[in-house]
Amino acid sequence: MLKSNAPVNSLSPSDFAGTARAYLQSALIDPDNPDNPRSHTVPWQSEKLFYRTHEIRTRAWLVNAVIEPDVVVCLHFNAEAWGNPARPQFVPRNHLHLLVNGTYSAAEMRLHDQRFDMVSRLLSRVHGEERALSEAVAASMAAATGLPAYEYTTPNAKRVGPSPYVYARNLLANRVYRCPVVFIEPYVMNNREVHDRVKAGDYEGLKMVAGQQRQSIFREYADGVAEGLKNYYSTNRRR
């Protein structure tokens, strides 16, 4: 079992430079133009291919072919736009939501691999358990954190079921794992309170942070997830 925080794959961003250059050229972007925004440069696209595509697909191979778990729990901290990167600003918003796979766009459906992944998930019938698990964890995380539900205003995600916290969205990380995925997005990292709580680190009991007696943010997160999983499996245990 892996216990390191290093990438799972053995490659590096520089290994994707050729693919990144070819992608930019196919999009009629000159990769050598010094006036390009950063997203139109070979280094930026190489890094994106490394962490957003190859790393997730390597993890998927490990999950699907080696570990073969009953469920995958993806733990994230969220963030919002913070203005000028040179002078970032805190935002007042702080919220929570969970994502199940779905809401494929017409452009995504034109891609062979995405159609294959979608049909594979439909035939595996993991969606029902994925949604029920996510709703259970959403309820426990909402109780643990007191955070309001995030509301999407873009067409790439839609509410599913009765929980205001659970949306369907098509992400690589919740599409290629062949088991239910609980994909959690709590805490806005560039919110002042969250920033202060993360800086406080882990600790036992309660501590005055951001003007309130609070549990460590990491223990609050872990306890909220564990409680939701316990609640779901204690009432849906296979006999």
Image (cartoon, rainbow, N blue to C red):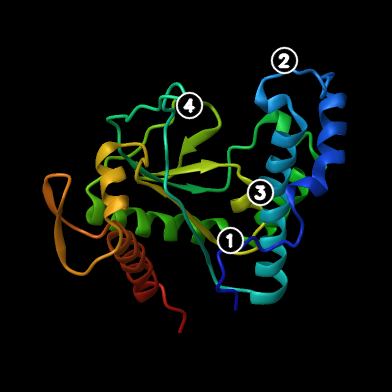
> Mark 1 falls on what kind of element?
loop
Left/right of residue 236 with respect to residue 4 in the rendered view: left
The x and y percentages for residue 68 are 64, 74
Q: Nearer the viewer, mark 4 or mark 1?
A: 4
Q: Which of marks 3 and 4 is in front?
A: 4
The CA distance from mark 3 to mark 2 is: 25 Å
Mark earlier in primary sequence (2, 4): 2
The CA distance from mark 3 to mark 1 is: 26 Å
**Label 4, residues with CA under 10 Å away: few <14, some 14-19, many ≥20:** few
For mark 4, what is the residue? 85
Q: Which of marks 2 and 1 is in front?
A: 2
Q: Are marks 4 and 1 in contact (CB under 8 Å)?
A: no
Question: Quick one: 211 or 159, which is closer to the camera?
Answer: 211
Q: What residue type is labelled 3?
A: Tyr
> Mark 3 falls on what kind of element?
helix
Q: Quadrant of the N terminus?
A: bottom right
Q: Do the residues labelled 2 and 4 touch (CB within 8 Å)?
A: no
Q: Is 202 drawn above or below residue 90 in the view shown?
A: below
Q: What residue type is labelled 2?
A: Asp
For mark 3, what is the residue? 51
The CA distance from mark 2 to mark 1 is: 46 Å
For mark 1, what is the residue? 126
Q: Is 7 drawn above or below residue 32 in the view shown?
A: below
Q: Which residue occupies 64% across, 75% down? A: 67
Q: Which residue occupies 58% across, 37% down? A: 103
Among the 4 quarters of the image, the one containing residue 205: bottom left
For mark 2, what is the residue? 35
**Label 2, residues with CA under 10 Å away: few <14, some 14-19, many ≥20:** few
The x and y percentages for residue 84 are 45, 21
